[in-house]
């Protein structure tokens, strides 16, 4: 059992998820670094956390889009740590393309990983938080879920779905002391955006720069740790792009 509080961050081997894991560990949480395939990156995240903090992070491989594997993993987490205090539903993929050419596989894979996974993970974790009568859930949405994005009908639909999911769940779980919020990143410097034409994008952003994974992580930490009176909100971290 853990002496520290425990945070589960999905898709935490790199990018925004990694930054969130590090930020929560710096706040004193034992972090479960979930990953789907990149074991080396996940282990590097764990090593960085250990170098920075006195917490007990662990890398855990499971596919968040597979309900049975998620349930098994959550049971293992409870057996080891005895609690889950924060859940960050961050795992996500893109399969971009114009809708008229979008294959069923491209649609379903994005919906499964970006939206259905939030159900698969949150369902068992929320039951644990209800028993604890405390907890914080942060769902990683996107500006694409707020105002749509051409060539991303699947991604935008999933991220918009997370916003509705966040607001409904916030109403259901508030009486049990559980808060549920969402963060909607704009264009952030990660592997997902490295191939984009950033000069044109920056022209559209009032603050005239891309965001960093740390910008998102600090917002996640604020919502999960630093406040106890915010729930059901979607916080845009986008340099003013969606105004």
Image (spheres, rainbow, N blue to C red):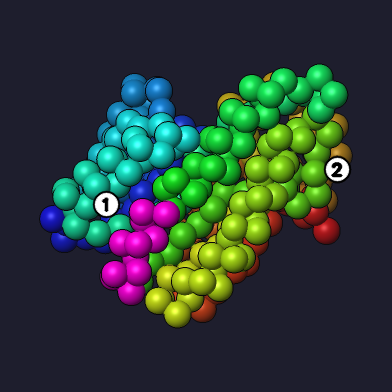
Residue 40, located in which quarter of the rendered image?
A: top left
Residue 130 within the segment the image draws in magenta:
yes
Secondary structure, mark 1, is: strand
Q: Is residue 54 visible?
A: no
In three-dimensional space, the C-alpha distance between marks 1 and 2, rounded to whole angstroms, equals 39 Å
Secondary structure, mark 2, is: helix
When the figure is inspected, residue 160 is found, relative to residue 221, above or below; the finding is: above
Q: Is residue 68 visible?
A: yes
Q: Looking at the picture, how far across and down is residue 56, in whole percent?
A: 21, 47
Residue at coordinates 75% horizontally, 33% vertically from top-left?
Answer: 152
Residue 149 within the segment the image draws in magenta:
no
What secondary structure do most residues of the magenta stretch adopt?
Answer: helix
Residue receiving disc 2: 204
Residue 17 is left or right of residue 188, and the answer is left
Residue 17 is left or right of residue 158, and the answer is left
Q: Residues within 10 Å of mark 1 (few under 14, many from 20)?
A: many
Residue at coordinates 81% horizontally, 49% vertically from top-left?
Answer: 147
**Residue 135 has which mark?**
none
Which region is colored magenta?
Answer: 123-133
Residue receiving disc 1: 30
Q: Looking at the picture, how far across and down is residue 52, in whole percent?
A: 30, 45
Looking at the image, is mark 1 or mark 2 earlier in the sequence? 1
Asked if labels 2 and 1 touch by Cβ distance under 8 angstroms, the answer is: no
When the figure is inspected, residue 38 is found, relative to residue 78, above or below; the finding is: above
Residue 31 is left or right of residue 18, and the answer is left
Q: Name the image quarter holding the C terminus.
A: bottom right
Residue furthest to the left in view is 1
Which callout, 1 or 2, points to the residue nearer the camera?
Answer: 1
């Amino acid at each position: 059992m853990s002496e520290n509080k425990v945070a589960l961050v999905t898709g935490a081997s790199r990018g925004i998820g990694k930054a969130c894991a590090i930020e929560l560990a710096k706040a004193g949480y034992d972090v479960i670094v979930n990953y789907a395939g990149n074991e080396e990156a996940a282990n590097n995240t764990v090593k960085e956390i250990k170098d920075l903090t006195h917490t007990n992070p662990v890398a855990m491989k499971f596919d968040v889009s597979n309900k049975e594997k998620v349930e098994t993993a959550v049971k293992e987490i409870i057996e080891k740590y005895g609690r889950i205090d924060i859940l960050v539903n961050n795992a996500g993929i893109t399969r971009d393309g114009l809708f008229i050419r979008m294959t069923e596989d491209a649609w379903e894979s994005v919906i499964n990983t970006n939206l259905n996974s939030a159900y698969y993970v949150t369902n068992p974790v929320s039951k644990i938080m209800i028993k604890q009568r405390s907890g914080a859930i942060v769902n990683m949405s996107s500006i694409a879920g707020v105002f749509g994005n051409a060539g991303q009908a699947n991604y935008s639909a999933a991220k918009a779905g997370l916003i509705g999911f966040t607001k409904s769940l916030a109403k259901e779980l508030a009486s049990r002391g559980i808060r549920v919020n969402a963060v909607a990143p704009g264009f952030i410097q990660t592997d997902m955006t490295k191939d984009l034409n950033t000069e044109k994008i920056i022209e559209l952003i009032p603050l005239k720069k891309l965001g960093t994974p740390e910008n998102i992580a600090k917002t996640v930490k604020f919502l999960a740790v630093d406040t106890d009176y915010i729930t059901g909100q979607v916080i845009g971290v986008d340099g003013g792009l969606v105004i």
